[in-house]
Image (cartoon, coloured by chain):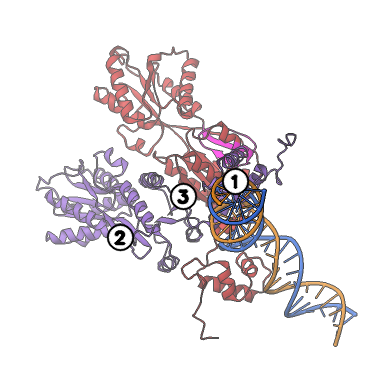
Chain colours: A purple, B red, C blue, D orange
Amino acid sequence: MSKNKNVLKRKNPMGKVTIKDVAREAGVSISTVSNALNNVDVLVPATKAHILAVAERLNYIPNLNGKLLKASESKMLGFFTTSVSGPYFYVLVEAMARHCEKLGYGLNIVVAKDKRAILNNILGQRLDGVLIFEELLIDEKDVAMMEKAQVKAVFLDRVLENETMGSVIFDSYAAGYDATKYLISLGHKKIAYISGVDTMYDSVQRKEGYLAALREHQIPFDESYILQGFFEEEGTYNAVKSFVHSHPETLPHAFLAGNDVSAIGCIKALKSQGYQVPEDVSVMGFDDINLAEYFSPPLTTVKNQIARQGILAVDHLVKLIKNEEKGRIQKLQGEIIVRRSSALKVDQTIGR
Amino acid sequence: MSKNKNVLKRKNPMGKVTIKDVAREAGVSISTVSNALNNVDVLVPATKAHILAVAERLNYIPNLNGKLLKASESKMLGFFTTSVSGPYFYVLVEAMARHCEKLGYGLNIVVAKDKRAILNNILGQRLDGVLIFEELLIDEKDVAMMEKAQVKAVFLDRVLENETMGSVIFDSYAAGYDATKYLISLGHKKIAYISGVDTMYDSVQRKEGYLAALREHQIPFDESYILQGFFEEEGTYNAVKSFVHSHPETLPHAFLAGNDVSAIGCIKALKSQGYQVPEDVSVMGFDDINLAEYFSPPLTTVKNQIARQGILAVDHLVKLIKNEEKGRIQKLQGEIIVRRSSALKVDQTIGR
DNA sequence: GAAAGAAAAGAAAACGCTTACATAAATAAC
DNA sequence: GTTATTTATGTAAGCGTTTTCTTTTCTTTC
């Protein structure tokens, strides 16, 4: 009895230890091991303790695939995104991860540009639900399929609501509207808008908001005041430079850039042409990226509550999973952060 | 025949469609479906096409748990980290994700501060291998267990090599050494070091490198020249401010900060006391974060090739998985980026 | 001390898939 | 037109779990 105490022999010495190994070593059946491990209090304490000790000694870790094959939930959420670049990504992920943990879920982040990979993961049943931030990769048909398959999902970059899927997005329309209104309140009338990427929801909405504010204040809209910056520093730099060059007589009072990166390109271009910001022209962006505060001049911008978005999205997703609510659309309002790139319009000679 | 074409009836109308549903609907056995789906070219083309069409129509997606239970590999790598904050995280992830995709692997990022969660995932057989960036959460014992279980892993923040695990880290010692040497080459002799977090490998190594460079140049080491900045802007600001206050007679020629964030805090503190950077004092950091370029003055720093680290780590991991090599340690050298926060020491009155 | 009842442990089916093997069908050989 | 080959499909076992249900063991109770 004691002589074979140490001669533990697993069938496959190099393989992973399974519940069978534990059962054999502990001298009980696998169902008993399972019960011991899962705290089903139906075992005599001594048995349970013994099994647990054996499991510990063998470094037994349950195979999740076997487990999930049976289980109805994995307590795992997914976050699918095509790209993690961009400075606020980590704020979003950090917030989501913390909140998931608080709610007792794990978070699996998958970065892929391949729709197939994403869908397989979503529908491959390894996740209870999924947060999605991809750019128009998933089309109508895919959404329909997901809906049919009862996938629980929350989108972060598109508006969509049905039985099992919802959205948590920024109110970019309001952001564009508010920003424009703020610039108008400073006395600016000629306001140029530097557009981002026309296929992106945010970009389009911001511009619509801008146009609405102009309309509301009866400021005539000038088509030539819409520049294409593509959300990029260089693109904006070039656009603004050539614009300023060709419109020396009609320099705008202010530029509203599609995002902060674009605002930086704008300011650099203006400086290169000998204009001062904000003395000659005001410039405003969106996002409030890290850099905004440190740039010279520090950027006036509309801040998105990124962490809040992450938390609300996770909350919503968990409620969808628990069938506590239907999918719905939540819009988050931005907050105007006034720094030094914008100023009251004081000098009538501006825009000479 | 045609009248029941649309009356597809699955056992469980709300449940997910399985391989059985496809088999029934296609009128073949499940093994035939499996073969068709996995491109085992043993089927008559017509059969295969038919099965594929049925699968498509039913929106069949294989359950990964069932699949992986049998399979020996998942073609999935994991990246485990305790936190994603810090501006270079996304560079790392982006590089890893792209490279994984290129090599035919998926990447699963798990953010968790719970060791148990991490280990369960690693050892739960859902991943072929794992990249690890956590701070001393996983201890000796865990590593031993992982080694015994033949886990394939590459660590990004600790040095370790054995049969199945390796490391890809920055040579922080060399970075500290090189940075100090560079400052000395500018003529600075009194160089203060602003330490980070003393439990972190990088922090300790950088300081060791700094000390080694001083030694090599026979510059006496002054204990009071070591400040505690904790890798944070505010911590550094306070430390530098009080230091400057209490050492008006012995202001260093240069400050070497544990990272860029710390360097920024340092410069702010110096400015607040009326000193100019780099005219009065040179300041240098580590990392080359985004902001470094835009700060005023732009920061001289040691850049880490973060994307390179990610790529090398993935490469190494995949080789470990394929048993093409044993675990080993790779050290990446930093690169000094000279900007305007450092300058030649010209004025003997500095450090008055 | 035997029968009944409660408690503990085990046997076996099921989850969805792959795969080695067996069988059936089609083709080739004589 | 049989029989031998090849080719195509089906059968069934097994992957590691959980879980229902049955069997065994232990307590009571009289």
Q: Which residue position is annotated with label 3? A: A108
Query: Residue at left 35%, top 65%?
Result: A162
Q: Residue at x 31, y 31 (%)?
A: B297
Q: Quadrant of the C terminus of chain B?
A: top left
Answer whether residue B153 is magenta in the image: yes
Amino acid type at image mark 3: Asn
Residue B224 horizontal/vertical position (percent): 37, 15
Provide the chain ID for the residue under circle 2.
A
Among numbered discs 2 and 3, the one appearing first in the sequence: 3
User: Magenta segment, which residues?
Assistant: B145-170
Q: In the image shown, does A215 or A164 lie closer to the viewer?
A: A164
Query: Horizontally, is B78 left or right of A159 in the view?
Result: right
- The percent position of residue B330, horizontal first and vertical second, equals 57, 35
Q: Residues within 10 Å of mark 3 (few under 14, many from 20)?
A: many
Q: Which residue is mark 2?
A: A329
- Residue at mark 2 to residue at mark 3: CA–CA distance: 23 Å
Query: Which corner quadrant of the image does residue B26 belong to?
Result: bottom right
* A83 lies above or below B286: below
Q: Chain of mark 3?
A: A
Q: Could you say which disc has been placed on residue B318 in the image?
A: 1
Q: Give, as a three-letter code, the residue at label 1.
A: Val
Contact (CB < 8 A) between labels 3 and 1? Answer: no
- Pick whichever, A177 or B143, lies toward us: B143
Q: Is residue B197 visible?
A: yes
Position of residue A216 measured from the top left corner of the image (x, y, whole percent): 13, 61
Q: Please say if the residues under marks 2 and 1 sit with CB atoms less than 8 Å apart.
A: no
Asked if badge 2 and badge 1 are on a common chain, one would say no
Cα distance between the residues tagged 3 and 1: 20 Å
The secondary structure type at the circle numbered 1 is helix
Question: In which image quadrant can residue A56 be found?
Answer: top right
